Image (cartoon, grey):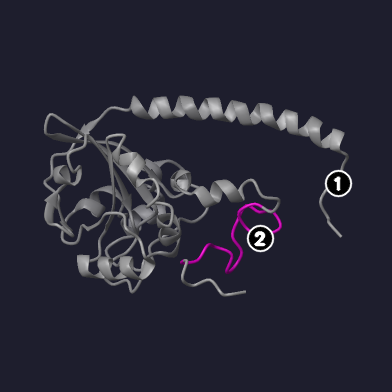
Amino acid sequence: MTHHKVGTREEWLAERIELLEREKELTRRSDELARERRELPWVRIEKEYVFDTDEGPKTLAELFDGRSQLLVYHFMLGPDDEEGCRGCSYTADHFDGPLIHLNHHDVTFVCASRAPLAKIQAYQRRMGWGFPWVSSFGSDFNVDFTLFTEEQRRTGAGHNFGTPRHGDLRIAPAAPDGEEPMALSAFALDDGIVYHVYSCFDRGTDALHTAWALLDRTPRGRFLTPGGDAPATGDWPRRHDQYEEA
């Protein structure tokens, strides 16, 4: 027997209409936030980052691949990791489909990890992904954009730009030189100059997950815990080749 509130169709419709107003308000606010993101000042990139790619070494500017906008997902796969972060792997399952649409809107998308390219390629083959994935091994790219020192982790100074945080971060399992959250960064290329324009961490990357959006509209939500707002043991999404048949 269900423990959830049960009502009539009329009661459901009345509450649904009230909820619809709040959903519309959220949509309008989301559009406004998107505009405000685009109005952030651009910061010129002074360092010369070099990445190992399937086509050979490339600078950050060359990663744009002839386009003017670049999105980089900072995939947690460190030099000593045996496999990619479980959360990042779940996120990456959503990347291949949008690529053609992004490319035709003047946007290049890549993943970047601190692991050597050979380790990245092996894990990508295992998971069956086709999106561009580059190695920042040996460069300061992750140090400058996503890698937090133990002091920053302890004080929260690195996460979300020094603002207060709630709960624990989803941290890379093996990062001896620091700790790394789920993250996305945006860059612009204008007149040959690369600019950093936006970054977000942890829950800020939720917008990348179609599965989260779908689960948020199911009766039980994202997680199978009673409140549906935090993962229980074993409740976090797994790598897609590790789900039990049951």
Q: Amino acid at mark 1?
A: Val
Residue 198: x %, y % from top left:
32, 37
Q: Quadrant of residue 46?
A: top left
The residue lying at 25 percent from left, 70 percent from top is 119
Q: Describe residue 39's horizontal placement relative to residue 234 as left or right.
A: left
Q: Amino acid at mark 2?
A: Leu
Residue 27: x %, y % from top left:
55, 29
Q: Is residue 117 magenta?
A: no
Residue 224 disc label? 2
Q: Describe residue 52's horizontal placement relative to residue 121 as left or right.
A: left
Q: Residues within 10 Å of mark 2 (few under 14, many from 20)?
A: some
Circles 2 and 1 in contact, beta carbons < 8 Å: no
Residue 57: x %, y % from top left:
11, 56
The answer to whether one can see residue 207 in this image is: yes
Looking at this view, is 148 or 6 the one in front? 6
The residue lying at 16 percent from left, 61 percent from top is 138
The residue lying at 60 percent from left, 26 percent from top is 25
Give the residue at mark 1: 6
Q: Describe residue 49's horizontal placement relative to residue 161 as left or right.
A: left
Q: Is residue 238 above or below residue 194?
A: below
Tell me which secondary structure the magenta stretch mostly adopts: loop
Q: Is residue 210 above or below residue 86?
A: above
Q: Quadrant of residue 174?
A: bottom left
Element assignment for label 1 = loop
Element assignment for label 2 = loop
Residue 186 disc label? none
Lower position in the chain sequence, tag 2 or tag 1: 1
Q: Is residue 229 above or below residue 18?
A: below
Q: Residues within 10 Å of mark 1 (few under 14, many from 20)?
A: few
Residue 78: x %, y % from top left:
29, 65
Task: Give, as a single range, the part of the protein colored magenta.
Answer: 221-239
